[in-house]
Amino acid sequence: MRLTVNGLDRDFRELQQDATIAMLVSELGFRPDRVALEQNGSIVPRTRWAEAPVREGDRLEVVHFVGGGLPG
């Protein structure tokens, strides 16, 4: 399956045609509680990831939250 993730065209051969956003997030190696995801210009709530399909040619933006910083 060919997808554009964060502006880069990528081939996800491991993903089946019935893949979901939850499966893609797992394939990318992200922790679901630290990611926000936009699919074709629309934010997809985490509560819908398990049933939200990923389709050939989708454009996805994945934002990974990172903790840390200097103590205040």
Image (cartoon, rainbow, N blue to C red):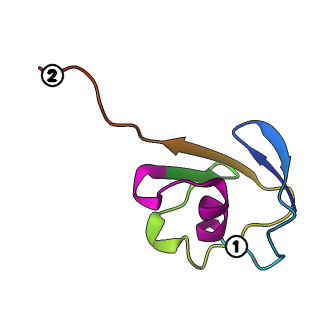
Q: Which residue is located at x 63 percent, y 73 percent?
A: 52
Q: Is residue 28 left or right of residue 10?
A: left
Residue 64 sits above or below residue 15 on the image: above
How many numbered marks have been drawn onto this rendered protein structure?
Answer: 2
| Mark seen at residue 53 | 1
Circle 1 crowding by C-alpha within 10 Å: few under 14, some 14–19, many from 20: some
The quarter of the displayed image where residue 1 is located: bottom right
**Quarter of the rendering occupied by the C terminus:** top left
Counting from the top left corner in percent of width and height, residue 17 is at 84, 76
Tell me the distance, in whole angstroms, between the alpha carbons under discs 1 and 2. 41 Å
Q: Main secondary structure of the magenta part?
A: helix
Please give the range of residues in magenta.
21-35
Q: Which residue is located at x 53 percent, y 42 percent?
A: 63
Counting from the top left corner in percent of width and height, residue 53 is at 70, 73
**Pointer 2: what residue?**
71
Front residue of 67/1: it is: 67
What amino acid type should be assigned to the residue bearing mark 1? Pro
Q: Secondary structure at mark 1?
A: loop
Residue 47 sits above or below residue 30 on the image: below
Q: Secondary structure at mark 2?
A: loop
Q: Which residue is located at x 78 percent, y 56 percent?
A: 58
Q: Is residue 59 left or right of residue 25?
A: right
Sequence-earlier tag: 1 or 2: 1
Residue 31 sits above or below residue 4 on the image: below
